[in-house]
Amino acid sequence: MKKLFSINPATEEILGEFPILTINELEEKINLGHETFKKWRKVSFAEKKDLMKKVAQILLREKEKFAKTITLEMGKMIGESLAEVEKCATLCEFLANNSESIMKEESTKTKAQKSYICFEPLGIIFAIMPWNYPFWQVFRAAVPALMVGNTMLLKHASNVPQTSQLIEKIFIDAGFPKGAFQNLLIDSSMTSQVINNLYVRGVTLTGSEKAGSIVASMAGKAIKKSILELGGSDPFIVLDDADIKKAVLTATSARLSVSGQVCISAKRFILQKKIAQQFIKELTKNFKGIKVGDIGPLSSKKILETIENQVDISVKMGAKIIIGGKRTPGKGYFYPPTIMTNVTKKMPLYFEETFGPVATIFIVENDIEAIKIANDTKFGLGASVWTKDLKRAKKFIEEIESGMVFVNSKVVSNINLPFGGTKMSGYGRELSSYGLKEFVNIKTVFIE
């Protein structure tokens, strides 16, 4: 019997083993999701609002328990885990209160007696979710899907089975009907069976570009709507008139949150020459002050080995280490905060996403060169620009190829703003009114 394993990345201890669903069990869950959808789609917004508010209440009431499970399974610091659970509760409250108004019919003038657009649910939405934000990523897919009347099947990352089971239980305990949200303990080989099922009408994936390409191909062949939120190599651009103290402080958290395992982490630090040495000096000082216990382990041995290889190969090709660069000895998948310079185009640190606490430094002469390097990547998720001149910032906003640009701030997800990227960072949007309407039938009505 195939199993999924829950492993503590800080100690390498096996926390639990979980059997994978059989083909028949999987089919039963899909059929249940469809039968539930036929009823759930007719449930009023008022009733859905009450249920989603109960989810928020459970999240806040039991946040310490949920946060502990997150930390044990994927290694982030407990404070980060608590903040993640609280953010999920905020999203539940926001969409519980606003979904009905966002989804209301839109009238439009034509030659008809009446014409309008309405929004209807599609059916089962299949969510393939990652481990780095094991609650938040699921909730930002599930809450809008459920509020518009869809049902959801979740294939979570294989290393967080305890977390995925907890999430299903939260929706059940809140009173959602059986089958509205179901956790699937399956491996990647069973993904195609779910996508190809006629009852599944949409697929949302957050993960690697490789996984996104495979899933998008399956969805396209089956003519299913898909959303992809993939990797990022976000630039953090500091101009010569920036508030350096604030920029360095923000850069530290932007690179090291969740041990650098965030798609919207600042990964490439593009510094104008005038302020480069000051910024590097201050950032190095901050990184030196962070020890094991201030930063958690990487989530798995595979992730640790990947970041090690990226650094080691780049060093052999001429990259220089300012600080860090070698795994922390002893038990657990720990890697120290690392700063690299002399990174060139042929190196892994230049063209690959670095999913760990490694910052790469690029020094430029002017704004044009900064924009050129910022765009010299296959990714296009977010970008951070630091300047006191907002007219100057406007050029960066217009010319940087990304789904999001944040000025004098790190890139974050905000429930009021659409989240997503361009280029190899994927397509589609989550959060805000745009995310709520991704998995609906936009129906035109024309009455002569």
Image (cartoon, helix red, strand yellow):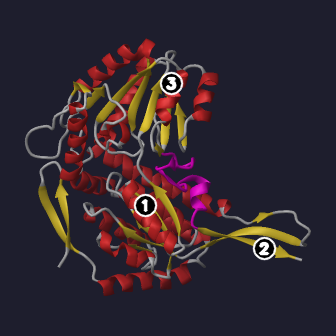
User: If you read the primary sequence from the N terminus, does the residue marked by circle 3 or circle 2 appear first?
Assistant: 3
Residue 397 appears in which quarter of the rendering? top right
* Disc 3 from disc 2: Cα separation: 50 Å
Q: Nearer the viewer, mark 3 or mark 2?
A: 3
Q: Which residue is mark 2?
A: 445
Q: Residue at x 29, y 24 (%)?
A: 286
What amino acid is labelled 3 in the image? Glu
Mark 2 surroundings: few (<14), some (14-19) or many (≥20) residues within 10 A: some
Spatial CA distance of label 3 from label 1 is 31 Å
Mark 3 Cα shell of 10 Å, populated few (<14), some (14-19), many (≥20): some
Work out whether residue 207 can be spotted: no
Q: Nearer the viewer, residue 195 or 115?
A: 195
What residue is shown at x 44% (from left), y 55% (from top)?
Answer: 89
The kind of secondary structure the magenta stretch mainly shows is: loop
Q: Which residues are magenta?
A: 413-439
Measured as percent of width and height from the top left, residue 103 is found at 66, 64
Regarding mark 3 in the picture, which secondary structure is present there? helix
**Magenta stretch: includes residue 424:** yes
- In the figure, residue 356 lies in which quadrant? top left
Q: Which residue is mark 1?
A: 213
Circle nearer the N terminus (2, 1):
1
- Picture quadrant of residue 396: top right
State the residue in front, 292 or 264: 264
Q: Quadrant of the C terminus?
A: bottom right
| Residue of label 3 | 369
Is residue 262 or residue 56 the one in the foreground? 262
Circle 2: element type: strand
The amino acid pointed to by label 2 is Val
